[in-house]
Image (cartoon, rainbow, N blue to C red):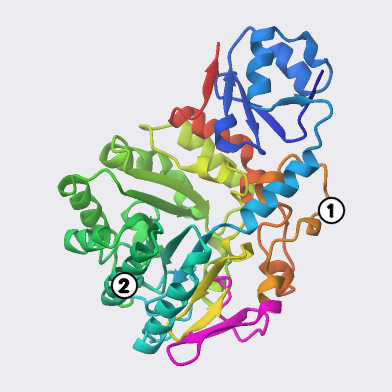
């Protein structure tokens, strides 16, 4: 006998097909059910019919994807095991800031851009930390961040070579990613980063030239769009490797909504057929800082974000969206909530969250340098770990994805949250429809 899993979500595609998603399984669970079986499955999903009424072939698929589970299964125990796997990841994850300086002055950015660069003492402290601890982990992942990290390219290249040597000596895999504004990412720099095993790139490009240049100007007020686009097209045309991925993130403001069809036409014709380029939509958020106050009238609500997804489905060529990664178990859990993830500033301060470089005592969890090595405050580190009981809805279908707390900063720093639920949950139906309309994420059951 089988029962319906607690963690099932379903919605309709743009053309009326049934889309299924199991948050405990993640992207591998995505199913598209075509007629004539969609109606009877809806009855089961709404608990108006017993799973036994389903045709055996359909039942087998739903059992395989764990939409239907044995009646004696305790999914709460599965959730506990998932929490341990996600929070106590076997990978050491370090977010390193070679500099906090930036060549942009984005209108919504929360950072203050102190003119600091990582000195030799901090670099040596990081190398000693990695060398002493790497044997405890299954691998090392470095995320280069800033400021604008490419202003500290020499630090990235030098440290990468040294950390890769350490990992080779210990027979541990090494991976790296970078969040960059893309302005300095010319072809020569890109090749240097590939040699440093930086294979995952996130670059923000806010719409077409007019809105991007307004929202993301250079320090001198000039536009940045043309240079970034030139760099991206040069990489597309001259780099033959298929081992890298570039995610183009767009932060939508109110002014950009009317231009979505033109946006899709522009970027779809240039990058839509190249699987190395992926797209990711987000609303401009209030991440703190002073600049956001002057930009507040341009912020959009969740209803308008739904309109953006709908327009993206209706117009223009297909884009390769990457929302599948957010659909995996733990996909909405912030890196700051994980035990083995740390952020290190150019001055050697250790934080959990990249958005909280402040004097608030709970934000800073340690420091690192060549002389004293790393000093961690174990109590403050523990405070940042995800707290499943922070959510009072233990019947929520989305718990495997957010583990009850997607942003620990709201609790640790005692900052009131507009909502505890992540954006992925609040826009889930539209996200699934967008994926269905733009790529082949869903396994079809005919």
Residue 29 x/y as whole percent = 59, 30
Image location (x, y in percent) of residue 128: 43, 80
Judged left or right of residue 319, residue 22 is right
**In the image, is residue 353 part of the stretch drawn in magenta?**
yes
Residue under label 1: 392
Where does the magenta region start and end? 352-379
Q: Nearer the viewer, residue 36 or 443?
A: 443
Q: Is residue 280 left or right of residue 118?
A: right
**Residue 118 percent coordinates (x, y):** 37, 83
State the image quarter where residue 231 is shown: bottom left
Res 204 seen here? no
Q: Quadrant of the N terminus?
A: top right
In this rendering, is residue 402 above or below 36?
A: below
Residue 56: give x, y in percent of width and height.
69, 8
**At 37% from the left edge and 77% from the top edge, which residue is drawn?**
98
Q: Quadrant of residue 75?
A: top right
Residue positioned 77% across, 34% down in the render: 6
Q: Is residue 91 magenta-colored?
A: no
Give above or below for 445 relative to 319: above
Residue furthest to the bottom: 371
Which quadrant of the view contains residue 67?
top right
Q: Is residue 19 above or below residue 86?
A: above
Label 1 element class: loop
Residue at label 2? 162
> Closer to the observer: label 2 or label 1?
2
Q: Is residue 393 visible?
A: yes
Query: As rendered, which of 353 and 79 lies closer to the eye?
Result: 79
Q: Mark 2–mark 1 contact, CB under 8 Å?
A: no
């Amino acid at each position: 006998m089988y029962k319906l899993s607690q963690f099932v979500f379903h919605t309709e595609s743009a053309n009326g097909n049934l889309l299924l998603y199991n948050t405990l399984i993640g992207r591998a669970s995505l199913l598209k059910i075509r007629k004539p079986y969609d109606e009877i499955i809806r009855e089961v999903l709404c608990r108006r019919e017993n799973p036994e009424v389903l045709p055996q072939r359909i039942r087998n698929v739903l059992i395989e994807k764990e939409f239907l589970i044995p009646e004696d299964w305790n999914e709460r125990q599965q959730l506990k095991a998932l929490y341990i796997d996600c929070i106590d990841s076997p990978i050491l994850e370090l977010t390193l800031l070679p500099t906090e300086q930036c060549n942009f002055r984005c209108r919504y950015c929360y950072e203050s851009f102190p003119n600091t660069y990582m000195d030799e003492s901090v670099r040596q402290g990081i190398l000693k930390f990695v060398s002493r601890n790497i044997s405890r982990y299954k691998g090392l992942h470095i995320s280069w961040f800033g400021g604008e990290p490419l202003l500290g390219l020499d630090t990235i290249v030098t440290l990468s070579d040294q950390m890769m040597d350490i990992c080779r000596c210990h027979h541990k895999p090494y991976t790296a990613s970078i969040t960059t504004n893309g302005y300095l990412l010319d072809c020569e720099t890109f090749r240097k980063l590939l040699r440093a095993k930086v294979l995952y790139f996130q670059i923000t490009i806010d719409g077409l030239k007019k809105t991007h240049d307004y929202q993301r100007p250079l320090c001198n007020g000039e536009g940045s769009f043309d240079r970034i686009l030139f760099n991206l097209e040069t990489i597309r045309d001259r780099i033959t490797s298929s081992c890298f991925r570039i995610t183009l993130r767009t932060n939508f403001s109110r002014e950009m909504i009317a231009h979505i069809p033109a946006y899709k036409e522009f970027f779809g014709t240039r990058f839509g057929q190249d699987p190395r380029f992926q797209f990711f939509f987000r609303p401009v958020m209030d991440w703190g800082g002073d600049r956001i106050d002057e930009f507040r009238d341009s912020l959009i609500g969740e209803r308008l974000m739904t309109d953006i997804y709908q327009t993206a489905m209706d117009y223009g060529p297909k884009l390769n969206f990457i929302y599948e990664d957010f659909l995996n178990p733990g996909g909405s859990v912030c890196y700051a909530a994980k035990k083995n993830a740390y952020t290190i500033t150019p001055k050697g301060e250790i934080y959990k969250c990249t958005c909280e470089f402040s004097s608030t005592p709970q934000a800073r969890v340690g420091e690192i340098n060549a002389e004293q090595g790393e000093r961690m405050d174990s109590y403050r580190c523990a405070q940042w770990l995800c707290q499943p009981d922070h959510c009072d809805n233990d019947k929520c279908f989305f718990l495997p994805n957010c583990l009850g707390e997607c942003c620990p900063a709201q609790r640790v720093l005692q900052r009131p949250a507009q909502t505890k639920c992540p954006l992925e949950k609040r826009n889930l139906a539209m996200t699934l429809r967008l994926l269905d309309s733009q790529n082949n994420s869903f396994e079809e059951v005919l």
